[in-house]
Amino acid sequence: MSTSLGKHVTLTKPDDFGKLLEDEGIIFTTLDKAVNWARKSSIWPLGFGLACCAIEMMSMAAARFDVARFGAEVFRPSPRQADLMIVAGRLSQKMAPVVRQLYDQMPEPKWVISMGACATSTGVFSNYALIPVNQVIPVDVYVPGCPPRPEQLIYAIMMLQEKIQAERGTVLKTLNLA
């Protein structure tokens, strides 16, 4: 079955109609995908630099690596304004309650990147005073290395953006219906 439209176009398959509208600048999507796109494009990190990995995290925001391309350049000074915590460096037992309190103060939705071997598994400083970040707060993306390069952290942000885009039920969660 074919359908004729006013622009001298004959549609033979349902997919043809979507391509016609796309050529006209009309996009179809779900509300979940639109909200997830907005969330992944405006990640506001809370920089929590504890050791040498923090220097690499700071250089990621500089002109050479330019994390602004991914919408994550606004490092927030307050956890109440951030939705991504980047824990860069070794986490001591004395600092763990502080990290937990800052995580609890962040609004939902919130994500965590564990940056460096020390934050992930206590690294070369494996002793009684250090603990991995995932024993204190849930971690979404791990960045290996000692210290990891800024490109690795940018890749971790890109992986987090893919995770955010793939979430389902975002609108229902936002409206407290799920």
Image (tube, rainbow, N blue to C red):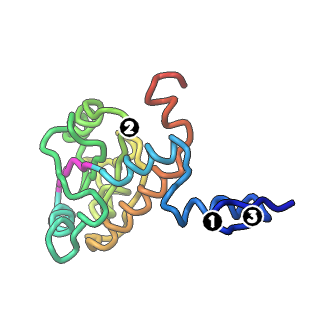
Q: 25 and 97: which one is in front?
A: 25
Of marks 1 and 3, the one in the foreground: 1
Disc 2: CA contacts within 10 A as few (<14), some (14-19) or many (>=20): few
Residue under label 1:
7
Residue 143 picture quarter: bottom left
| Vertical order, 119 against 78 (above or below) | below
Q: Main secondary structure of the magenta part?
A: strand
Disc 1: CA contacts within 10 A as few (<14), some (14-19) or many (>=20): few
The location of residue 35, given as percent across then percent down, is: 43, 43
Residue under label 3:
11
Q: With 30 as the anchor, is 106 left or right in this view?
A: left
- Which amino acid type is shown beneath numbered disc 1? Lys
Find out whether the residues at labels 2 and 1 contact each other: C-beta distance under 8 Å: no
The location of residue 177, given as percent across then percent down, is: 52, 22
Q: CA distance from mark 2 to mark 3?
A: 43 Å
Residue under label 2:
109
- Which amino acid type is shown beneath numbered disc 3? Leu
- Which amino acid type is shown beneath numbered disc 2? Pro
| Vertical order, 28 against 56 (above or below) | above
Magenta segment boundaries in residue numbering: 44-50
Query: Residue at 24% across / 42% down in the picture?
Result: 82
The location of residue 137, given as percent across then percent down, is: 36, 40
Q: With 104 as the anchor, is 3 left or right in this view?
A: right
Q: Quadrant of the N terminus?
A: bottom right
